[in-house]
Image (cartoon, helix red, strand yellow):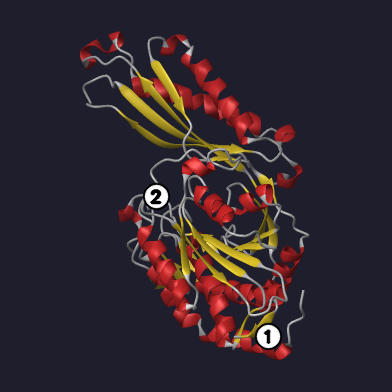
Amino acid sequence: MIPLDPGAKRAILEAVTALEGEAVDRLAALVRCDSTLGNEAGALELMARNYESLGLAARRIPTDPEALKDHPGFSPPLISYAGRDNVAALHTPREQRGRSLALQGHVDVVPEGAADLWITPPYEPSIRDGRMYGRGAGDMKAGIVSYLTAFQALKLAGLQPAAPVQMQAVIEEECSGNGALATMLALPKTDAVVIPEPGPGLAAMYSAEVGVVWAWVTVTGRPTHVRDMHAGINAIEAAMQIARRFKDYENERNRAENIHAAFRGVNHPVNVNLGTVEGGEWNSSVPTRARIGLRVGVMLGYSAAQTRTDIERIVAEAAGEPALRGTQVKLEFKGFMADPCAFDMESEICRLARRSYAEISGGELREYPATGLTDGRFFTLYQDTPVACFGPDAQEIHGIDESVGLASMHAITGSIALLMAEWCGVERA
């Protein structure tokens, strides 16, 4: 790494402070974008304008399932990718002296849930007690703003990275990761990757993460009038019987002998979630069909393929029970088919991230074995590229009244700015 001149460091940090107000405005603009699955176009267009405001050309990168289907990191898609291309930008130095870096983040967010439970509407950003509230504020639009502002801070200080820097804004981190996969494969491999994903509500760096498989079970029963319900087969009740079997599986996968050393001390790291239920036609009719959606965690040391086989077995055994005789049971896999991974916490980029964060905040980044997953797995598993995954303090992600600490966002901005300057080196802008 190229030592950073004290004067340059001071100028960069002063620029980070000077840009705090603009960063908050930028975050608010992103939070106003409802970028749930299929609706990401507005946020992607805004990201293109953000890149262009930094003097970088925005590049659209499509997600093509046909081109990706044979890659081991591919997940079966849920919907069409038309009209929602990923967006990237590339900074090229005049003379490369340092090492290249990718700054990556996802613009997609999960649904807001019951909007009436929010104190303020989920897509109307609100600042209260130093936190910005809104869907996606923490997961992970604040992290994206941090990497944008970090690059801008170098420019304001009269500097720019002396190595190629990629910025990537991708879709479907929340359901497949295919946007990250497509973008990674479309761009040159970098020497390191920084993903400013939020941690567990405290300063942390992802050390490992579980994998995830999404499965969908559709049960078709025998409809009748409720007066003859014992002559019918209730598809909803049958689907619930199948779902209950996964609690036994969850307990099995959380047994001590099945937990990887990286997750020792983490309470219940493998989670199986019954996430969606659809079914029925009429309160006085035995329902014809029910569909349940399951999210099944995959422990490090196990694989998504093994988990898929387990799911197939569990569903087949349930379908063979006398209580389900006469039903039709269909199993599909759409969305995540993601393997777990561990990050190299002693890589140079992770050590630099910890040092930069300590210099900015006076604190330390704790190691965080995550019971969820990030796009970092693609770079680690399929490129052997070191990843530093750390971000601002976010609370209630995927829940009601999601928020991010603005002081934390500014600290992550400063950390990334110092990291980028030292990793890439700097030259006059």
Q: How dense is the environment of label 1, judged by Cα within 10 Å: few (below 14), some, or many (20 and up)?
A: some
Say which mark, if any, is on residue 180: none
Residue 196, compared with residue 302, is above or below; it is: below
- For the residues labelled 1 and 2, the Cα–Cα distance comes to 40 Å
- Hey, what amino acid is under mark 2? Leu
Q: How dense is the environment of label 2, judged by Cα within 10 Å: few (below 14), some, or many (20 and up)?
A: some
Residue identifier under label 2: 37
The foreground one among 273 and 23 is: 23
Horizontal placement of 36 versus 382: left or right? left
Residue at screen point 62% across, 60% down: 188
The foreground one among 95 and 240 is: 95
The image position of residue 387, as x and y in percent, is 67, 59
Residue 224: quadrant of the picture = top left
Horizontal placement of 253 versus 176: left or right? right
Residue at screen point 76% across, 43% down: 261
Contact flag, marks 1 and 2 (Cβ < 8 Å) = no
Task: Single out the residue that lies furthest toward the front.
Answer: 94
Mark yes or no: residue 100 visible: yes
| Lower sequence index among marks 1 and 2 | 1
Horizontal placement of 71 versus 328: left or right? right
Residue identifier under label 1: 9
SS class, disc 2: loop
